[in-house]
Amino acid sequence: MPLPSYALTVELQRPLSAALADVRQALEAEGLQILHAVDLQQGLMPQVPAQQLLALWAPPLADAMQAEPQLGALLPLGAYVVAVAPTHTHVALQDPMLLAAQTRNREVHKACKTLYVSLRRVVDRLMLGPPITF
């Protein structure tokens, strides 16, 4: 039996710093906020490749928590951005449908579906790359 997917992923042919800027811009375009960023290489795990964990928030999460307050124990959503090579970055965004799978609450499912669509658009934006200016 295959394992369920827990992340929406994209590979970027950009260095980590440029990829992080693109991730931030794509998230903001969808109304998602970065609550906190942790640079794992700075102090916590200096022996690993450059990588960051991002804690994400979006308005649909407030709706989900109103419908089911215990859901807060599973929040915020996470994102992981890691340098695979000097000009290659891997981005993984937590699939909000994992939250939906923890409940039968219709409002939570609705909020998670809304977030899923937003995160798919984030992945699409990242795959297309930064806008070209003329």
Image (cartoon, grey):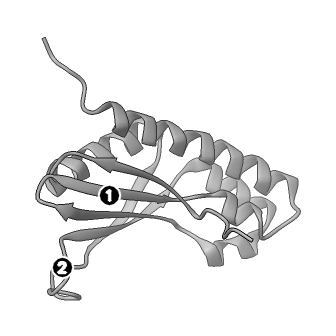
Say what amino acid the circle numbered 2 marks.
Answer: Gln
Q: CA distance from mark 2 to mark 1?
A: 16 Å
Residue nearest the observer in this picture, 30 or 59: 30
The answer to whether residue 129 is above or below residue 44 is above
Secondary structure type for disc 2? loop
Q: Determine which residue is flagged by label 2.
A: 41
Figure quadrant of residue 43: bottom left
N-terminal of the pair, mark 2 or mark 1, is 2
In the rendered image, the quadrant that contains the C terminus is: top left
Figure quadrant of residue 124: top left
Residue at image point 53% right, 41% down? 120
Residue nearest the observer in this picture, 100 or 86: 86
- Cβ atoms at labels 2 and 1 below 8 Å apart: no
Q: Residue furthest top?
A: 134
Residue at image point 62% right, 74% down? 74
Q: Residue furthest front?
A: 1
Residue 126 percent across, percent down from the top left: 35, 39
Mark 2 neighbour density, 10 Å: few (under 14) some (14–19) many (20 or more) = some
Q: Determine which residue is flagged by label 1.
A: 90
Residue nearest the observer in this picture, 59 or 41: 41
Residue at image point 61% right, 40% down? 117
Question: Which is closer to the viewer, label 2 or label 1?
Answer: 1
The answer to whether residue 126 is above or below residue 99 is above
Q: Is residue 93 left or right of residue 116?
A: left
Say what amino acid the circle numbered 1 marks.
Answer: His
Secondary structure type for disc 1? strand
The answer to whether residue 92 is above or below residue 72 is above
In the rendered image, the quadrant that contains the N terminus is: bottom right
Figure quadrant of residue 52: bottom left
